[in-house]
Image (cartoon, grey):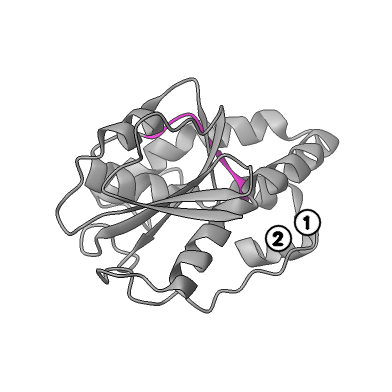
Amino acid sequence: MAIHLHKGDLPEGLDLGPVVAIDTETMGLNPHRDRLCLAQLSAGDGDAHLVQFAKGQYDAPRLKALLADPARLKLFHYARFDVAVMRHYLGVVTEPIYCTKIAARLVRTYTDRFGLKDLARELIGVELSKQQQSSDWGAETLSEEQLAYAASDVLHLHKLKAKLDVLLDREGRRELAEAAFRFVPYRAALDLEGWPDVDIFSH
């Protein structure tokens, strides 16, 4: 495994393949207040590419092109938040997407535990550490522990997707999952526009 740290954007010529695992680290959970600090990406090959953003510097043309590329599937765990925060700071709508949390909710109806740590343990036998989850991602220099934590959030998503795809097909919920994935950018837009806790479909 190799972790590559890039400042401000992905390097020119980097090919992350047709399915790219993506995650973000921010200063908190409010996109309007808590800035985007880091974007992590992996092609599923055991390597992670981390793009660190200085405050207010979100040009990143190569990353933006990848996020908007209709030929590349973007793979997330809890896409709703990452898609919203990248839309707010990078000004790009990310699609098409696949969300392992949505898929897990559709097929793992026997539990209420849908965190990435829970999925990794149950489906692929990997123990993830969440020790650095609440650390200062806005620091100019990130620690080795932070970099390893950030990388771990994308390194296993391809394997999780493969397991979840089998379960979606087994339970006959693939079409429903794909419809939910297509709706995520709109759910993220609703969050940003002021409806984060409102079910607009309720009576």
Residue depicted at x 48% and y 74%: 145
**Which residue is the extreme one toward the right?**
170
Q: What is the secondary structure assignment of the residue under circle 2?
A: helix
Q: Is residue 176 magenta?
A: no
What type is the residue that disc 1 sits on? Ile
Q: Is residue 22 visible?
A: yes
Instruction: Please name the residue that numbered disc 2 is placed on.
Output: 120
Residue 44 pos. (x, y %): 62, 42
Mark 2 crowd level (few <14, some 14–19, many ≥20, 10 Å Cα)? some
Frontmost residue, 85 versus 198:
85
Q: Which residues are magenta?
A: 94-100
Label 2 vs label 1: CA separation?
5 Å
Residue 110 can be seen, yes or no: no
Taking the spot 50% from the left edge, 26% from the top edge, the residue there is: 72
Q: Contact, CB < 8 Å: mark 2 with mark 1?
A: yes
Quarter of the figure with the N terminus? bottom right
Whole-percent x and y of residue 103?
A: 66, 45
Q: Secondary structure at mark 1?
A: helix
According to the picture, the residue beneath numbered tag 1 turns out to be: 124
